[in-house]
Image (cartoon, grey):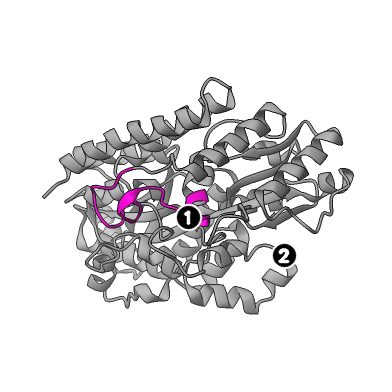
């Protein structure tokens, strides 16, 4: 009798609409703190908007760690459906033949209209192959901007509504902050990205040959130019005088700004959500500083952050779920809310316009800086940087710049070493991916 009842109950359950199992979509990411909450909320809101699919966000460590874990999982046959990859991993993912499915294909196969022209050009262009096919879905796209502590500026006799625009002005502001008793006038996060990559584009000078790698695998590093040497020398002098305090790699120095310890920082626009929530002082956002005697400066900044890659080897129903989720993320309202909450770029022009119309930029001065830095007209030297083995090159940049800040190497020695060591990795990548 019990068996009959169970069978009847099963039949009844199958007959009830909406009881069928949802298709689960695994999404591996590297977002922490307030941005981690944002990712969880996006998945939660999408899951609540429909009943067919369930997106499960899984934190897999730093960008480097999640990429390594995904490659191992792919080889073992259990990769996630969606992998968040930071921009420096783009060339590596593009070269991973058979491991990924282009996002353009995923969207069109699922019957969704997918127009790369709807995206901010500098964003879409970075994730598009030479044949015009968009390879990954722009997600938390960012760029580098300048944050400063208005209360600290006021205490130092500086105008809190006039952030420094040039590097000479930054040095003067740092000196006044130090004179007023500030122990950390300035720090830097993501030093390779902010002081070499973004610095190069902002001054319209090459970071690497072959249009910074976008025009071919035979690109080579060019960060030991006279301008690069001059800039790193200036930072080294600031470090000696206690005007610039090195606080570590990646995003680690950001905590020193939020706590009020350091008064100025250059880092990702995506740091805004953290500052807005946790800073207990008045703060300002500004454009990156530049050298006024450099022709063509300021130009535009380059993309940072990450995009979402679709891994291969999944079922058609699962790809339909991925496409449905991406279509949800593309909605201008969802985009605009994400942009307001995090500081990451609104990846479509429609979302940017919607945010502008809402009055958000007027209510929160400076929140449009990242977009305006990115939508300037780009040149072949400022379109972006796409180099192979770039995760390892970033580590080299960190190692060599640390030697400068500690006084063990001159700026020229360190930058020459970055070029030599970086080129060895680029040559290796070119050989491995020819043909």
Mark 2 closeness class: few <14, some 14–19, many ≥20 residues within 10 Å: few
**Foreground pick, 177 / 224:** 224
Q: Does the magenta stretch include residue 291?
A: no
**Furthest residue toward top:** 408
Residue under circle 2?
A: 364
Q: In this view, does 312 lie above or below 247?
A: below
Residue 311: x, y in percent?
Answer: 26, 52
**Foreground pick, 128 / 199:** 199
Residue 159: x, y in percent?
Answer: 84, 54
**Furthest residue toward left:** 435
Residue 187: x, y in percent?
Answer: 65, 37
Residue 281: x, y in percent?
Answer: 80, 47
Q: Quadrant of residue 364?
A: bottom right
Q: Residue at x 79, y 46 (%)?
A: 280
Q: Residue at x 33, y 74 (%)?
A: 114
Mark 1 closeness class: few <14, some 14–19, many ≥20 residues within 10 Å: many
**Residues shaded magenta:** 199-220
**Foreground pick, 361 / 156:** 156
Residue under circle 1?
A: 201
Dominant secondary structure (helix, strand or loop) of the stretch shown in magenta: loop
Q: Is residue 219 magenta?
A: yes
């Amino acid at each position: 009798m019990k068996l009959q009842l169970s069978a009847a109950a099963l039949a009844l359950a199958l007959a009830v609409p909406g009881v069928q199992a949802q298709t689960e979509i695994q999404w591996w990411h590297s977002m922490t703190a307030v941005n981690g909450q944002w990712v969880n909320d996006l998945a939660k809101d999408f899951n609540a908007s429909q009943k067919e699919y369930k997106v499960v966000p899984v934190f897999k460590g730093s960008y480097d760690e999640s990429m390594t874990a995904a490659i191992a999982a792919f080889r073992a046959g259990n990769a996630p459906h969606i992998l968040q990859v930071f921009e420096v991993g783009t060339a590596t993912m593009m070269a991973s033949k058979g491991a990924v499915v282009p996002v353009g294909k995923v969207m069109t196969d699922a019957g969704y209209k997918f127009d790369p022209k709807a995206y901010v050009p500098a964003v879409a262009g970075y994730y598009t192959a030479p044949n015009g096919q968009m390879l990954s879905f722009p997600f938390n796209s960012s760029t580098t901007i300048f944050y400063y502590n208005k209360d600290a500026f006021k205490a130092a006799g500086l105008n809190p509504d006039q952030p420094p625009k040039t590097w000479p002005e930054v040095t003067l502001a740092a000196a006044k902050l130090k004179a007023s008793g500030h122990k950390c006038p300035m720090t830097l996060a993501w030093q390779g990205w902010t002081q070499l990559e973004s610095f190069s584009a902002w001054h319209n000078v090459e970071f690497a040959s072959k249009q910074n790698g976008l025009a071919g695998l035979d690109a080579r590093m060019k960060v030991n130019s006279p301008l690069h040497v001059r800039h790193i020398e200036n930072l080294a002098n600031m470090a000696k005088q206690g005007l610039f305090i090195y606080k570590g790699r990646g995003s680690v120095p950001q905590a020193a700004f939020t706590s009020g310890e350091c008064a100025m920082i250059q880092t990702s626009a995506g740091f805004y959500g953290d500052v807005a929530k946790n800073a207990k002082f008045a703060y300002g956002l500004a454009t990156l500083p530049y050298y006024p005697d450099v022709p063509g400066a300021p130009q535009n900044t380059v993309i940072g952050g990450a995009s979402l890659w679709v891994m291969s080897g999944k079922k058609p129903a699962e790809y339909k779920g991925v496409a449905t989720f991406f279509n949800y993320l593309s909605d201008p309202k969802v985009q605009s809310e994400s942009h307001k909450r995090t500081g990451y770029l609104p990846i479509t022009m429609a979302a940017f316009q919607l945010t502008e119309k809402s009055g958000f930029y007027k209510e929160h001065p400076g929140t449009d800086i990242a977009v305006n830095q990115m939508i300037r007209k780009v040149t072949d030297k400022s379109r972006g940087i796409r180099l192979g083995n770039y995760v390892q090159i970033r580590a080299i940049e960190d190692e060599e710049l640390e030697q400068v800040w500690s006084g063990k190497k001159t700026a020229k020695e360190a930058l020459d070493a970055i070029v030599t060591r970086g080129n060895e990795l680029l040559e290796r990548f070119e050989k491995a991916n020819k043909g």
